[in-house]
Structure formats: C-alpha cells, structure tokens
Image (cartoon, helix red, strand yellow):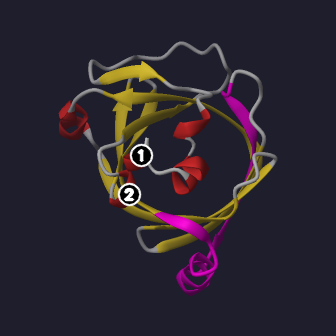
Amino acid sequence: MEQLEIERKFLVKSNAYKKDASSQTRIVQGFLNTDPERTVRVRIKGNKGFLTVKGRSNDSGTTRFEWEAEISISEATNLIDLCEPVILEKIRFEIPAGNHVFEVDEFFGENKGLVVAEIELEHEDEVFLKPDWLGTEVTGEIKYYNSQLSKKPFIKW
C-alpha cells in the first residue's frame, strides 16, 4: 500500500495512557537503510512481518511518502539479521481518543525510558483531542525518528 503519511509525534508525560489502551503489541524492527531520502524498515509486529519504505519528510516533519507490504515472519527475521545496528524493541499501545487513535511506543533496550505517542491525521492542520498524558510535541525533530533511534539510541543522548 502506498500513501502519504501525515502524523504528529509527542513525548508522553505519564503512564495514564495504559488504562485506556485498547491493545498492546510487541514490535521488533530494524533498518536496512537509514538515509533520510529513503528509509527501509523491517518490522515484526506481533506475529506478522512488514517491509516499509519511507521518503523524506516535508519541512514541518508531518508528511512523507510511505509504502508498506506484509512479508512472512521468516522473511522478516532473516532481513532483521541484515539490518544496521541497533535493532529497536518496543511495546505499542493503541489508545482511542475522540475520532483518532494514538499509538504510544514504550521503548526497551538501548532506548529504554523513551515513550513517544504518534497520531495519524487526514490533513496537517486537523484538530484532535489531546489527552492529559500527552507531553511536548516533537514532530519533525529527527532524533525521535525510529531510524535515528537505531543510530543514536536514547541512552546515548
């Protein structure tokens, strides 16, 4: 599936989101390429594998091209073995909020302590409900991109 991805990203200031989570899934992911022009990600989400290509973000950091295809778990596992270090591990919580769903990622390993929320939007200036646990907006701050967390993990900041 190809599309333009429009999302905003925030730090999370409390664990209050967990009580409203509709699901949680373990994710392991790595990057075959972290060039900002075209990142290539391999992800195992629960019991499914995915290969994703993302283009460069626009100036505000909210919008970029994204293509994703489901692949087998064995293919994803083999591709993760080829990825650049560091492999990211996280639990993703999905939290309904108004007409949207926040995805909150709680990182482990070398990114332990980082908790980030993302919301996908239909257009850049779309209004959305901001739960109390939502902290500072970090949309467009490259150090919070997963591809960059694999290069310079949170514990090294």
Q: Position of residue 94 (x, y in %)?
A: 37, 43
User: Which residue is the site of mark 2?
Assistant: 110
Give the mark, 2 or 1, whose residue is nearer the N terminus.
2
Count the marks. 2
Give the numbered dot on residue 154: 1
User: Alpha-carbon neighbours of circle 1 within 10 Å: few (<14), some, or many (≥20)?
Assistant: some
Quarter of the picture containing the C terminus is top left
Inspect the image, locate mark 2, and give the three-letter code of the amino acid beneath it: Glu
Q: Could you tell me which residue is drawn at 76 percent across and 44 percent down? A: 3
Residue 71 against residue 155 in the figure, above or below: below
Q: Residues within 10 Å of mark 2 (few under 14, many from 20)?
A: some
Image quadrant where residue 30 sits: bottom right
* Magenta segment: 61-87
Kind of residue at disc 1: Phe
Query: As drawn, is 2 to the left or to the right of 124?
Result: right
- Pick out the residue farthest to the right: 37
